[in-house]
Image (spheres, helix red, strand yellow):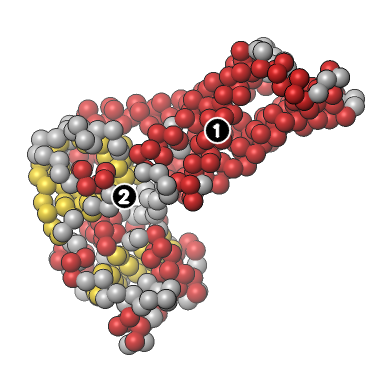
């Protein structure tokens, strides 16, 4: 819709009327690719702004998946914009591409546009999975923030070059509104709301409890934490204000539903950042952004509930089950671990008030080498399948949380068993 509006406004302003020869065709194509590419980049920023309406309807993981999918096409369109315009201008001037490029660099606005293009290339290249894995999350995130700068420093050339967005036109008003929406959303929902919310609730670390090797529960205290209106299964972006952790925000699920004065998250040491927050001291000030996520019982569509959790994926599952009003026989829960040390919070699941009369199973043991399965070798040898674990699977909502590759295998089996997509619930935190 946004892309169509941008192109329609350009056509309505008589943009196609300037096409009289090949140079005009190339110039027009360059303008259109630039408009569409810029529009997509601004849409990407809106998707990354964590707007509550988008989160409630689609979930931030879905919004960010679309954000990532748009990245490459947007870059290709911006690159095509520069190439087509340069060739079109060169043909119109009777010069060559090199001379025309040098001429374009003479204007300060165009120099900024080329700088913005270079930053976008850097952001997209470092977002490719094979490249991204070579960076720490912190380094990658810092580079990714350059996309904001890339968009902003390219604005002057849009308003001054070529007269496409001439003052007083509908096009100019549309683009200014789109920029205000994108950057206004980021300012409000990524910065303003979290700052106000954190100050209002005054969250601090009350205690750090070790529950297994490399795993801790961080108990938090604050004011009116129930007014966060956290649903079981949701997560928040947490920032711990210590010298070693203030610069890194962590997406971590609630491992219990907050009360008026307390909340809890459970963290596994999966890298430098999570290891550092597991060592925070009592009294440490904490900022919160959220809660976010659609991994809640509000999105259930089936009469029964099937749950599979592995490793630290137990945390949103535990709060989901705590928050759900379950009837006896409604839920079946499978807790998966390679060994008993991975039984984080398992002892709490059966004790939840809503779990009376519902089934809780455990599956321990390593997966077989060379076989793509989420189950243990011992379970496979006994003939266990997803249907034997969940005999009412097709009339259930399937909630899955664990390592991404493992989760994908559970979902694969669910789909193979005929489970509709709307009954599969998963939320991803991978970057």
Which residue does the numbered mark 1 point to in the structure image? 120
Residue at x 71% of width, y 22% of height: 101
Q: Mark 1, mark 2: which one is toward the viewer?
A: 1
| Label 1, label 2: how far apart the Cα atoms are | 32 Å
Secondary structure under the numbered disc 1 in the rendered image: helix
Q: Position of residue 222 (x, y in %)?
A: 15, 36
Which residue does the numbered mark 2 point to in the structure image? 234
Q: Is 38 located above or below residue 76 in the figure?
A: above
Q: Is 236 located above or below residue 159 in the figure?
A: below
Q: Is residue 260 left or right of residue 166?
A: left
Q: Position of residue 208 (x, y in %)?
A: 11, 47
Res. 182 in view: no
Mark 2 Cα within 10 Å, few/some/many (few <14, many 20+)? many
Residue at x 49% of width, y 63% of height: 421
Residue at x 30% of width, y 42% of height: 250
Res. 331 in view: yes
**Outermost residue toward the bottom?**
382
Tag of residue 6: none
């Amino acid at each position: 819709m946004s892309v169509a509006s941008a192109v329609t406004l350009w056509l309505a302003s008589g943009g196609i009327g300037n096409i009289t020869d090949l140079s005009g065709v190339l110039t027009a194509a360059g303008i259109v690719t630039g408009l569409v590419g810029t529009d997509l980049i601004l849409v990407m920023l809106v998707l990354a702004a964590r707007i509550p309406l988008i989160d409630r309807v689609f979930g931030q993981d879905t919004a960010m998946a679309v954000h990532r999918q748009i990245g490459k096409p947007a870059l290709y369109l911006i690159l095509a914009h520069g190439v087509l315009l340069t060739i079109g201008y060169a043909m119109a001037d009777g010069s060559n591409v090199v001379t025309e490029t040098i001429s374009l660099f003479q204007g300060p606005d165009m120099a900024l546009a080329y700088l913005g293009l270079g930053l976008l290339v850097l952001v997209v290249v470092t977002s490719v999975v094979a490249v991204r894995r070579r960076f720490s999350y912190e380094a990658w995130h810092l580079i990714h923030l350059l996309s904001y700068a890339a968009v902003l420093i390219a604005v002057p050339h849009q308003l001054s070059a070529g007269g496409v967005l001439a003052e007083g036109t509908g096009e100019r008003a549309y683009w200014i509104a789109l920029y205000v929406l994108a950057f206004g959303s980021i300012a409000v929902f990524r910065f303003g709301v979290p700052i106000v919310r954190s100050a209002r609730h005054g969250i601090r670390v009350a205690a750090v409890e070790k529950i297994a090797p490399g795993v801790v529960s961080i108990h938090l205290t604050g004011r009116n934490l129930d007014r966060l209106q956290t649903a079981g299964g949701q997560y928040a972006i947490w920032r711990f204000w210590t010298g070693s952790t203030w610069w890194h925000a962590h997406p971590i699920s609630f491992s219990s539903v907050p009360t008026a004065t307390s909340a809890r998250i459970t963290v596994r040491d999966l890298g430098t950042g999570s290891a550092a927050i597991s060592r925070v001291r009592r009294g440490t000030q904490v900022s919160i952004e959220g809660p976010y996520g659609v991994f809640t019982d509000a999105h259930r569509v089936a009469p029964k509930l099937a749950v599979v959790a592995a490793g630290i994926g137990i945390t949103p599952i535990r709060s989901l089950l705590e928050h759900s009003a379950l009837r006896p026989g409604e839920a079946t829960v499978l807790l998966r671990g390679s060994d008993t040390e991975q039984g984080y919070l398992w002892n709490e699941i059966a004790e939840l008030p809503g779990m009376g009369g519902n089934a809780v199973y455990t599956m321990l043991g390593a997966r077989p080498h060379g076989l793509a399965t989420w189950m243990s070798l011992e379970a496979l040898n006994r003939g266990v399948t997803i249907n034997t674990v969940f005999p009412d699977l097709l009339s259930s909502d399937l909630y899955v949380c664990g390592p991404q590759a493992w989760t994908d295998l559970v979902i694969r089996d669910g789909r193979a068993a005929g489970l509709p997509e709307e009954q599969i619930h998963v939320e991803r935190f991978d970057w």
